Image (tube, rainbow, N blue to C red):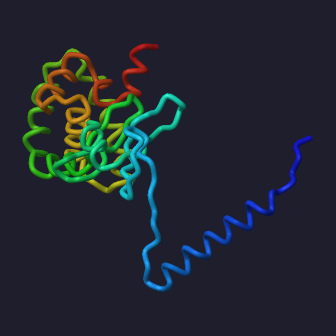
Amino acid sequence: MRDKRVDYKKCCLRQLNFFKRAMKIEQGKSPEISFKCEICRSPSSIINILPIRQQDGKLNTLACDKCAEKSGAFCTTHQRPHLGFEDGTTACKVCIDEKVATDTEKITNEFFSKIKNSPHKKRILEELDNWADSVYGITGLPYDVNVSRAVVTTALRLKKTPEEIVDQVSKEGPGVILPWAKEKDED
């Protein structure tokens, strides 16, 4: 049986420190808040939560600005951390949104013209239709925008162009942009 005793001295000290900080805030003084960057170990008052897995199993890393910018998981254009994906790749959400907003028509036209001649045409369209219907139910965005977003997101994650991703989907099938479709192919 575990000992459930509470260290009241530590508990009281924590509460006292909390109240001291609260009083400083109330009086208009900013409390000193700092943390150690998990990459360079230097103290910092700015926290960037990066989608970088650590060896101890943590799914993200706290980083200072300098380390964040060097990490590859931070968009220097938009000054924000990337989104993280299950396979360890990352991409900037704002970059995805901008590319989708400007190139949806071009990307979807190219996508469907390439898919017409693909040996995987039926499977691609079947998986894409199921996925796009689900996404539409959540976001309300039209089919072409969802297809474009899938292509652009994959392109940015893999550091390729949307055109290269469209070619890859045409040659390899829907698993390129829809990971669960790849799993079905392996079964």
Question: Image height check: is 77 above or below 8?
Answer: above
Relative to residue 56, is residue 29 drawn left or right?
Answer: left
Quarter holding residue 171? top left
Using the image as rendered, state which of residue 97 and residue 8 is in the foreground: 8
Note whether 74 is above or below 183 in the view shown: below
Q: Residue at x 14, y 46 (%)?
A: 99
Identify which residue is drawn at 53% across, 32% down: 57
In this picture, residue 179 sits left or right of residue 4: left
User: Where's residue 69, x and y in %?
Assistant: 25, 43
Lateral position of residue 4 relative to residue 179, left or right: right
| Residue 173 image offset from top left, x and y in percent | 27, 20
In what quadrant of the picture does the N terminus appear?
A: top right
Nearest the viewer among 152 and 51 is: 51
Tell me the residue at 13%/19% (across/down): 117
Closest to the observer: 164 or 30? 30
7 over 86 or under it: above or below: below
Q: Residue furthest right?
A: 1
* x and y percentages locating residue 168 in the rendered image: 19, 21
Work out whether 63 lies above or below 53: below
